[in-house]
Amino acid sequence: MGFQVSQSGGVTLVEVEGQLIVGNRQELKQRVLEQLEGGDRKFVIDFSSTGYIDSSGLGVLVSLSKKIREQGGELRLSSLNEDLRTLFELTKLDTLFRITDTKEEALDGF
Amino acid sequence: MADDLVLELPSDVRSIEHVVDYVMSACDTCSCDARRMRLNFRVGLTEALSNAMMYGNGDDPTKRVRVEVTIKGTRIEARITDQGVGFDPGSVPDPTSPDNLLKSGGRGLFLMRQLCDEVSFNDQGNQVTLVLCLEQGVPLEGGAQA
């Protein structure tokens, strides 16, 4: 379980490996905020290797999205599986984020 | 049927993933309705444990959380009890309303209510009972193993 951070064409790509839950949400927040403070403004968080996000994980994504928008940037999400999409739809967070099927799609459109 | 699985846990949110995995494994005979077990039950149990440890017990590692899982036919019931003072579940606002959508918290109870067939609290508000009714006509074989 962890986070892989890389750069692709001016976009910061964060790949979530495992789960995004109460036990590791702060690590993700810290990793993204470090990049934001370093000047990055375009972010994609990819969930192709993620099985589950709990409400704390959803909350961190909302918090990060707000902070990135406040700095004039954008956070996009990609590769949500069927269960994760259901969670975003139930909580209406699918209206808050641009969500793409693949990370390539998210990166290409930025 | 008596409680099939009973666990007493310290309030450590890092343990939640492992506890949920263990309970899911103990209930693996419920594969007749795999998606509802994987999504609905897993989410409900995770959120209930998270609420009990963080808000109920205030992340106090000396306070414990009790988990009881019972399977009766196609009905699976999980009761989670913390050692906090309790809360009023009716006071939690709708996280999907426009005023609350940008708030970072407040989605745990909502997800439990959305994904479980029944969610009830004791009078004190420190015990939640989740019920998931699996596919009718496909009774669970055996039951959870402690």
Image (spheres, rainbow, N blue to C red):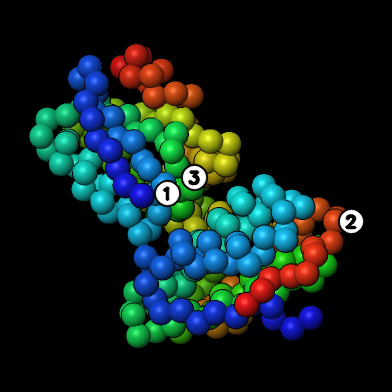
Q: Position of residue A5 (x, y in %)?
A: 24, 35
Marks 2 and 3, how far apart at CA: 29 Å
Q: Quadrant of residue A66?
A: top left
**Amino acid at pointer 1:** Gln
- Binning the other alpha carbons within 10 Å of mark 3 as few (below 14), some (14 to 19) or many (20 upward) gives some
Using the image as rendered, state which of residue A28 and residue A92 is in the foreground.
A28
* Residue sitting at x 46%, y 64%: B18
Chain label for disc 1: A
- Mark 3 — residue? A51
Is residue A79 positioned above or below A59 on the image?
above
Residue at disc 2, secondary structure: loop
Chain label for disc 3: A
Label 3–label 1 contact, CB within 8 A: yes
- Binning the other alpha carbons within 10 Å of mark 2 as few (below 14), some (14 to 19) or many (20 upward) gives few
Q: Position of residue B65 (x, y in %)?
A: 48, 79
- Mark 1 — residue? A19
Marks 3 and 1, how far apart at CA: 6 Å
* Residue A96: numbered disc: none
Q: Position of residue B16 (x, y in %)?
A: 45, 65
* Residue sitting at x 81%, y 53%: B135
Quick check: B61 left or right of A52?
A: left
- Mark 2 — residue? B137
Residue A3 visible in the shown view: yes
Chain label for disc 2: B
